[in-house]
Image: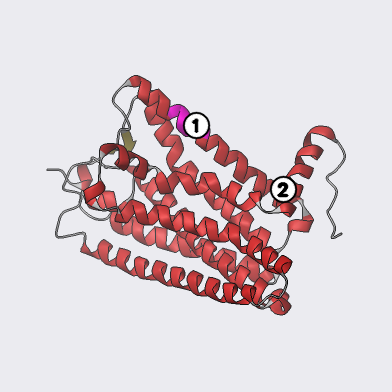
Amino acid sequence: MSNSSSITQFLLLAFAETRKLQLLHFWLFLGIYLAALLGNGLIVTTVACDHHLHTPMYLLLLNLSLLDLGSISTTVPKAMANSLWDSRTISYAGCAAQVFFFFFLMSAEYFLLTVMAYDRYVAICKPLHYGTLLSSRACVHTAAAAWGSGFLYAVLHTANTFSLPLCQGNVVDQFFCEIPYILKLSCSNTYLREVGLIVVSACLAFGCFVFIVVSYVQIFRAVLRIPSEQGRHKAFSMCLPHLTGVSVFVSTALFSYLKPPSISSPSLDLVVAVLYPVVPPAVNPLIYSMRNQELKDGIRKGIRWKFFNSDPLPISRHE
């Protein structure tokens, strides 16, 4: 038996024992990571440089891409390094940092998705009041609130988790440090306060989910009252990327945590382990750009300017 004062490092989940499979995992993670960096980096650069996209919807999307860049950078590089160097170790401080940044960025992203649902609700259900309810200042304040809430929750959970005595060894059954797996290492009679904090957080997360659902119920009711088919199609196109992004985020997280033990298997557990930390940051750029013509035009304009024009990037104006 060991306690937290004697633990200097943790052992993470090993993806494979054979060297070939370890290298395969390294190249697979590298491809996913580079795709996420490229996609989210293009969105951040395009929105930041194109003044035509300096609207609440795109500024919130910029914040979402920044959070995705941070969250995937918290977990995947360490997993790649472990696969490349045939290692499973992470230092105690590194594990605490990983817990903090992952919880900070993922919870902030969830809060931001809730704000984005409100943005879509106001844009479709109250378009005449959009400039008042979601001005640039209000957009900055709501985005800052999402970041600040995520930071506060991360500080509370990380401090609470790593103040617990760890009596069950140092093997973390996940490819990165995560609070539920750290709690499994704590003494059975000392982890209840962190569980209580998790329950409170779960209630808040459920409240955000209900807010998103109610917002979309109101949105769909408003869209169905639009007389023209073209108007309905345009309204649905505005909401579909965000609705898809929320669905991917929530479904992967729920499946990871609530997967029935009856369907557990080593291969499935491995897929689930990388599902929600990796999939949403990698696919969000595709989700939000595929059906958004303004964003695609801005990306193409930025690429053309970067490689084919040395003049300053022109400021876009409404047609």
Tell me if residue 305 comes above or below residue 24 in the rendering.
below
Q: Which residue is disc 1 drawn over?
A: 30
Q: Which mark is residue 296?
A: 2
* Residue appearing at x 83%, y 54% in the figure: 316
Name the spot of residue 284 as percent of width and height, x first: 56, 49
Q: Residue at x 47, y 27 (%)?
A: 27
- Measuring 61% from the left and 39% from the top, which residue is drawn there? 38
Mark 1 vs mark 2: in front = 2
Above or below: residue 33 compared with residue 127: above
Q: Quadrant of residue 241?
A: bottom right
C-alpha separation, residue under disc 1 versus residue under disc 2: 25 Å
Which element is circle 2 on? Answer: helix
Q: Position of residue 251 (x, y in %)?
A: 42, 56
Indicate the position of residue 296 as horizontal and vertical percent values. 72, 48
Figure check: 105 above or below 218: above
Q: Which residues are magenta?
A: 26-31
Q: Tag 1: residue type?
A: Leu
- 1 part of magenta stretch: no
For residue 216, say whether it is visible.
yes
